[in-house]
Image (tube, rainbow, N blue to C red):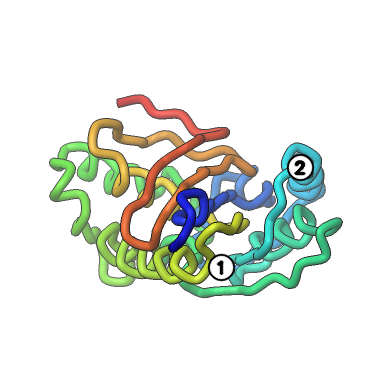
Amino acid sequence: MIKNRQRYCTLYIVRHGQTEWNVKELNQGQTDIPLNPEGIKQAETLRKNLKDIDFDTVFSSDLIRAKKTAEIISLEKKLAIKTAKALRERRFGKYEGLPYNDMKDFHKTWESLTRKARLSYKPYDDYETDEEIISRYITFLREVAVAHLGIKVLIVSHGGVMRVLLNHLSDKTYFTNAISNLGYIKLESDGVDFFIKELSGIKNDK
């Protein structure tokens, strides 16, 4: 019989460090942009803050800004990093590389929608909806949780998809603010249900 403490996988889902496109407020999406020097320092700081957590496994988005962040955080633990496209940022398509402000009209429309309607909102053809993100992201997290019960797992991903995840898991709170670079979500999961245990670098305004 599985002991109670082994019923759940503990997931630390971390946003990558800062990039130059973050500084310039450009949509990164799935464009492969590296960390800048500040992003490297941020990752080094989080490594110190999480040094006492005994991670057994590390997963990362296959985009370089996430993978490099994972490498820095797990450096002293000498763990191999497993990459997955399922952990990538939202696909912005033709708006990748353009200023956030270029999408302001889309954001205004989005804000006027109900919570349910926001899930399927698709302002243009190559934009990835919240529903599409949830499908790939939750499926991946469930697979990880089932395979790592009783284990602590580090996952490095991206702010946009992390916010979509939070809103999917939270019934009462709606998160619209950006997640800070190196902000993280601590979850426990048995592969079916997810429980939010801690938020760092994450604010909500609704």
Residue type at numbered disc 2: Asp
78 or 36: nearer the eye?
78
Seen in the picture, residue 57 relative to 108 is either above or below; the reply is below
In the image, 134 versus 41, the foreground residue is: 134
Q: Position of residue 53 (x, y in %)?
A: 71, 46
Q: Residue at x 72, y 42 (%)?
A: 50
Q: Which mark is residue 31?
A: 1
| Quadrant where the image shows the N terminus | bottom left
23 vs 42, nearest the viewer: 42
Please name the residue that numbered disc 2 is placed on. Answer: 52
Name the N-terminal-most of marks 2 and 1.
1
Lateral position of residue 124 relative to residue 93, left or right: left
Mark seen at residue 203: none
Q: Is residue 181 visible?
A: yes
In the rendered image, residue 150, in percent from the top left (x then y), is placed at 55, 57
Q: Report the residue at 43% width, 69% height from top.
A: 140
